Image (cartoon, rainbow, N blue to C red):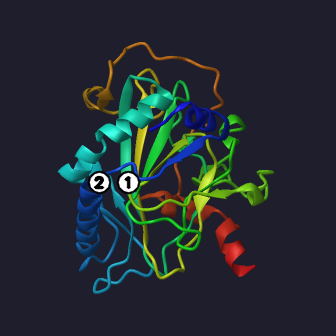
Amino acid sequence: MIGEAELRHYQEQGYVVIPGALDAATMAALQARTDHYVESARGKLASDAVHDLEDSHRSDAPRVRRIKDPCSLDGLYYRVARHPAILAAATRLVGPDLRYHHSKINIKAAGYGAAIEWHQDWAFYPHTNDSVLAVGIAIDGCDLENGPLMVLPGSHRGLVHDHHVAGRFCGAIDPDASGLDFSRAVSLVAPAGSITLHHARLVHGSAANRSPRPRRLMFLGYAAADAWPLTDMADYDKFRAAMVAGEDTLTPRLEPVPVRLPYPKAANQGSIYENQRALPRPYFTRVKAG
């Protein structure tokens, strides 16, 4: 699945796309189960531990922008995070000893899915080394119009950009102060059943979906077993039980990687969408206006 060419591309550019990585039966189950959880937001008045709701959500017309922690919510998602094809790809890129870190399903429903501003995952959860990545499962096909994941190739080799506003974490990069050339961004177009893999330090984001087609991406975070988190780890036993391949270790690998901690915590809690409300001049809002 990941040969030498794909490995080099990931190392140099910070991402790789694997079309058709997951079988049709797995994808049909994911699509049906995700439909169920979107519909289960019907009747809700506010975001909660399961659903992060669009600003335009109504209790009689569910509009969900994220299903939170699906692997803890449902056995199907838990099993998918341990799918042999996904583990084979992730271990090829970060090594044979692999730990599951987190999960989420970001949803851009047809015609209104919210944007996510430019950011680096590393800003949210730095580790002792950067053998950390995210796998994206294309539950729906991602095309140029429905808000695909966009990445800045090679940016994982550069700075860890400031994700703060007025001294408080906001989960987004100030597009004006960063010096980044967003015209270089690449859209990760992929049919349903594909997976994307991107480095935790890669700058990425996504525009709003104004197409008639939905775009749902399930993200799974993984780290090398010897990459230990530098932020909260409240439950060591849970951390140890998150191993999905290879052997655990009590010896963190320490590397001189750039780190800026996500403190003080964002003024708006609940999800990245809420964190990013503090960004004074959002990039994707301005792109729309322009």
Residue 148 in view: yes
Task: Farthest residue to the left: give it.
Answer: 75
Viewport quadrant of the C terminus: bottom right
Q: Amino acid at mark 1?
A: Lys
Q: Is residue 27 left or right of residue 118?
A: left
Determine whether 91 is above or below 109 in the image.
above
The reply to whether discs 2 and 1 touch (Cβ–Cβ < 8 Å) is yes
Q: Disc 2 marks which residue? A: 70
Q: Nearer the viewer, residue 212 or 17?
A: 17
Q: Disc 1 marks which residue? A: 104
Which numbered tag is attached to residue 80? none
Residue at x 50% of width, y 17% of height? 253
How many residues crowd around disc 2 within 10 Å: few (fewer than 14), some, or many (20 or more)? many
Residue at x 49% of width, y 79% of height? 112
Number of marks in the rendered image: 2
Q: Position of residue 143 (x, y in %)?
A: 54, 68
User: Which quarter of the figure has residue 285?
Assistant: bottom right
Residue 229 in view: no
Viewport quadrant of the N terminus: top left
Residue at x 45% of width, y 77% of height? 213
State the CA–CA distance, disc 2 to disc 1: 6 Å
Q: Position of residue 140 (x, y in %)?
A: 40, 66
How many residues crowd around disc 1 within 10 Å: few (fewer than 14), some, or many (20 or more)? some
User: Which quarter of the figure has residue 241?
Assistant: top left
Q: Position of residue 189 (x, y in %)?
A: 55, 61
Q: Nearer the viewer, residue 212 or 133?
A: 212
Mark positioned earlier in the residue sequence (2 or 1): 2
User: Which quarter of the figure has residue 147?
Assistant: bottom right
